[in-house]
Amino acid sequence: MEWLHNHPDPAGCRPLTLVVLPPHDAMTRGQLRRMVELARDEGVAVRWQEARGGLLKVLGTVLSLARALRRARTLVIGDPFSRYVQLLLALAPAGRASRSRQHLTVVDDGTATMEFVAQLAKGERLVRWHRRGAGGARGLLFAPVSRRARRRLTPPADGARPVEVFSSMPVEPPRNVTVTANEFAWTRARFGPPRLTRGADLVGTSLVETGVVDMDRYLEAVAALAREHGATRYFAHRRESGDKLARVTAVTGLEVVRPDLPLELVARRGPVGHTVLSFPSTVVHTLPLALAGTAVTVAVCDVDPDWLTRTASPRAQGFLAGVTGTARGVRRLPVSGPPDVRPEQPAPPAGPDAGSAPDARPSPPAAPGPGAASA
């Protein structure tokens, strides 16, 4: 939606068709369905494609989308690390003929975008930063498809196949790739400004689920931040497990909120705390943009190396430090000790009805699914 707001007539290719490839888990599917409603309100045609559940569904999805992928003049994809997205991208035209001058855009505000752009610039294999090894036998079998997708993401010097990265992440554009900044203009125009509460909100992370951070150390850090800053709510990441969230409540007393919209929209709609606390994650880059013009302070706590698991990728600490070090408009918190995150200027008092975020419903969190849009 932000890309469409920034590109009101992308390559003269209206109307835009959005293809959603939902995962199995209920929480992510719920968020996607809510976003589908918003997209349709903006006049976007949406195609909900059940693409998972065995080889037959995969083949059916590939065959049903192949013609549209080849004919599209503009192709917008999310999560270039997704094997499903890479498989569909491999079907897109890659020749230099005039009929193949397809404009490709990668839309992704995740922290992995920083790693993707760096790997693309170096011509490296596309591997998520927290992964170790080459992915086993499945990775070897998929390697030819991944290579073709990477070639499709690498534009030729003559500009025959333009490639754009649309993201709020601070990235240096690789050669011949256009980087367009996502400033969350659509979110600010569509929602808010939010009503502010007197307390602080804490944003959860999936670093435990991805095997990067130890569970007990994470819970200790969450409890310390909540105690030091008077946090009352914990906005769960969609990948966080139910057992972990139950421990968060038991250890910290925080109210766990599972948003059914992306956090940037939930925060912009409000109510939201005067201070939003986070560990290294996407939101330390996106929330300052979505909440621009408000009195909300976004504060980030670095991950102590002692919190990392034995199986964490060797790149994990440096990558996480880079996520916080490049964030703009946030307050950096020390790993230990009583950090000061008070706003630079006094914030207005909160209304009496400040409480849980709206449009939040419980459901089991899990990994998100990729999507692709074609015009």
Image (cartoon, rainbow, N blue to C red):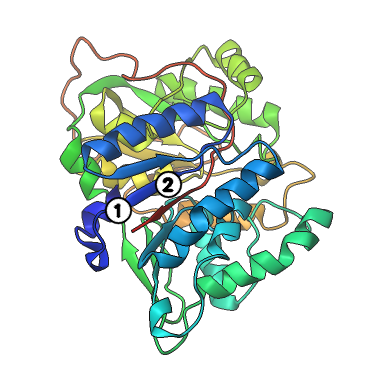
Q: Position of residue 286 (x, y in %)?
A: 36, 46
Q: Amino acid at mark 1?
A: Leu
Q: What residue is drawn where x is 58% and y is 59%?
A: 86
Q: Is residue 177 above or below residue 282?
A: below
Secondary structure beneath dot 2 equals strand
**Residue furthest bottom as drawn:** 158
Which labelled disc corresponds to residue 101? none
Q: Nearer the viewer, residue 13 or 369?
A: 13
In the rendered image, which quarter contains the C terminus?
bottom left
Q: Nearer the viewer, residue 69 or 207?
A: 69
Q: Position of residue 255 (x, y in %)?
A: 46, 14
Q: Where on the picture, by quarter, is residue 264?
A: top left
Q: Position of residue 89 (x, y in %)?
A: 54, 62
Q: What residue is drawn where x is 49% and y is 72%?
A: 93
Q: Amino acid at mark 2?
A: Val
Q: Is residue 116 above or below residue 292?
A: below
Determine crowd level at label 1: few under 14, some 14-19, many 20+ residues with C-alpha closer than 10 A. many
Q: Which residue is mark 2?
A: 19
Q: Distance from label 2 to label 1 (Cα)?
A: 10 Å
Secondary structure beneath dot 1 equals loop
Q: Where on the picture, by quarter, is residue 332?
A: top left
The answer to whether marks 2 and 1 mark residues whose Cβ atoms lie closer than 8 Å is no
Q: What residue is drawn where x is 36% and y is 24%?
A: 200
Which labelled disc corresponds to residue 16? 1
Q: What residue is drawn where x is 30% and y is 55%?
A: 3
